């Protein structure tokens, strides 16, 4: 049992993180199992939906550093290959289109001139 105050806090923080990570892992496993179950079912709509959910779970797990980002990328690639072999149509994730910042047209200002000296 820790004696120092900071060590006690680390135990508390680690316990919370363990619970949070376990929840993320559980969600990931459930999504992957649902995908494999959809593959055996053979319905392309279910396969596509399960694939989307599994990819989302992989992204969340990678973002929270529960799994490595390269592992998540590899698993997503494997999911896509299995879905394609299962007969599902690939639907790439839509990203929100970011509009480029438009500059307001401004009148060009000429450099300030010094007042002319009186003669």
Image: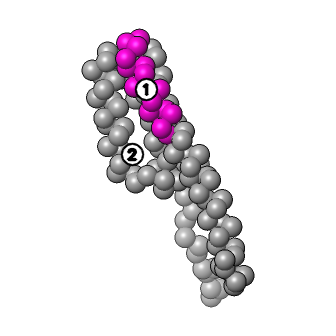
Per the image, the residue denoted by label 2 is 72
User: Within 10 angstroms of label 1, few (less than 14), some, or many (20 or more) residues?
Assistant: many
Residue 33 lies left or right of residue 110; in this view the side is left
Residue 39 part of the magenta segment:
yes
Residue 75 lies left or right of residue 3; in this view the side is left
Element class at badge 2: helix
Determine which quarter of the picture holds residue 58. top left
Residue at (32%, 15%) from the top-left corner?
A: 87
Q: Residue furthest top?
A: 43
Give the extent of the magenta segment.
28-43
Residue at (30%, 35%) from the top-left corner?
A: 78
Res. 99 visible in picture: no
Residue at (39%, 25%) from the top-left corner?
A: 36
Quadrant containing the C terminus in the rendered view: bottom right
Quadrant containing the N terminus in the rendered view: bottom right
Res. 37 visible in picture: yes
Residue at (49%, 39%) from the top-left corner?
A: 28
**Which of the two residues, 20 or 93, is positioned nearer the viewer here?**
20
Question: Could you say where residue 92 lies in the image, as x and y percent from the top left?
Answer: 40, 29
* 1 or 2: mark nearer the eye: 1
């Amino acid at each position: 049992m820790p004696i120092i105050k900071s060590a006690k806090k680390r135990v508390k923080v680690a316990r919370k993180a363990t619970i949070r990570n376990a929840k993320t892992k559980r969600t990931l496993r459930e999504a992957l199992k649902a995908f494999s179950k959809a593959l055996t079912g053979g319905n392309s709509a279910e396969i596509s939906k399960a694939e989307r959910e599994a990819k989302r779970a992989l992204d969340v797990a990678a973002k929270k550093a529960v799994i490595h980002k390269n592992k998540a990328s590899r698993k997503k690639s494997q999911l896509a290959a299995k879905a394609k072999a299962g007969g599902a149509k690939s639907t790439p994730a839509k990203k929100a289109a970011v509009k480029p910042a438009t500059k307001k047209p401004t009148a060009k200002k000429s450099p300030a001139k010094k007042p002319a000296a009186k003669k």
